[in-house]
Image (cartoon, grey):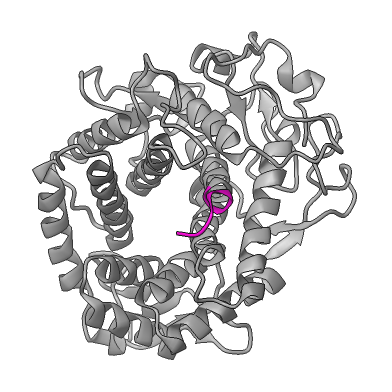
Amino acid sequence: MTQPDAEATRGATAHPDQPRPEAEPGDAAPADWAMRANAAARSVTGLFGQRLFFLPGTHIAAIIRPSGRLKNLARPWHYWWQAHYLDCLVDTGRRELGTAGQPPAKFDGERRPSAGRLASRLVTGIRLRNFLKYVNSYYDDMAWLALATLRLEQLAEESRRPSRRRHGRIRKSLTLQFDSASTDDLGGGTFWSTKRDFKNIPATAPVALYYARTGNLARAQALLDWLDAKLFDPGRGLYLDGLRINAAGEAVLVDAIYTYNQGPVLGALLELGGTANLARAAEVVDAVARQLTTPGAGATATGTTGAGHAGAGTSGPAVLRSDGTGDGGLFTGILTRYLALAARDGRLPAATRATAAQLVTDTAEAFWAGRRSISPDEALAKHGRPDSLVFSFEPALPASSTYPPGTAVELSTQLQAWMTLESAAAIAAGPR
């Protein structure tokens, strides 16, 4: 496995709870994905996490670093980035509970808050930052938050801590929104926003998954049926973006294909199960491998290679394609979350599971291999801790080229790498 190169380790100190360094390249020891995911969790929470308006018991993520705390609060409100931050904290929180081969342990040391505690504070921060409510103008935003808080509630139960009643209030409030947005207009589906002129996968798929996970199976299947009828492209085996209502009241197909759109559809197909849904899930996984990947160099900042990867500038394993920064900085990570579910689902063919696992682990390996540490003289250093890392927004390129020292770093891109590493850790942990 890849050792941090000279540039990546300069100025860094070991975290007190961090395992010993991994084996040298060529060693037979497998990657410690849990350790890598913990390193990403510490980096993102350390660099971007802050109190909201300095209020105790709150947590929120800055949108960009380096930047001042108050200046970040004046930036555009990226509600759905915070929802995915919450999902990542839940991922880490589940690992903190331990497994048969790994005792329970906090990701950031015993003296710092657990991931679950930070997640609870984040829910408070989101509500306060969103003007004392969870409802906003975009149904996809609310769907992502609903899915994340549902998982947080399950984490609380697994942690044997009483679930806070607010989770039930959130679920009730947001379910009413989804019921309102899932109409018969255009034959079904869920509106993207309160403008009600666009029904698309970013809203319909996570709402379908939410319905499936909360027991409304008929409504979830109806949304999936609409997606299959209106937005599935059988020639490519993937889902198109949506149907927009133009000024004349006509439906116009938006035939773009995005990585993250395939993810929640895959999740809903697996959650509902059944022969047809599982067959479609396998079809989507195979199509993603064929069409949404790019050759990955997998090189570290100085060109050394990770296990199974070629050197910088040469062809290596296929990694999932990325969609740059901004909102697109989340897209690849979201897909890996649901590919990891497919990789561990014994109802799918073995070849499909292997494909899903390879896509996730190769992409995670590329993100990890391309990381760089923050040097003490960078402006970023005042936000993070000595062992903080920066990950590239493009898995096939190292962070030294996409985020060189002095460059502002966006939260979305770092969540993406963290999410991908958590997905690899979930696969390594074994079947669901």
> Can you say which quadrant of the picture contains the C terminus?
bottom left
Quadrant of the rendered image containing residue 251? bottom left
Residue sitting at 64 percent across and 19 percent down? Answer: 374
Question: Where is residue 393 shown, x and y percent of the image?
Answer: 63, 43
Q: Is residue 431 magenta?
A: yes
> Does residue 72 appear to the left or right of 117 in the view shown?
right
Q: Is residue 391 visible?
A: yes
> Does residue 269 appear to the left or right of 237 in the view shown?
left
Q: Which residues are magenta?
A: 426-432
Question: Where is residue 159 shown, x and y percent of the image?
Answer: 27, 39
Number of marks in picture:
0
Question: Where is residue 392 shown, x and y percent of the image?
Answer: 66, 39
Question: Where is residue 189 shown, x and y percent of the image?
Answer: 31, 80
Residue sitting at 61 percent across and 49 percent down? Answer: 324
Height in image: 247 above or below 417? below
As rendered, which of 152 and 186 lies closer to the eye?
A: 152
As rendered, which of 68 and 174 lies closer to the eye?
A: 174
Height in image: 386 above or below 198? above
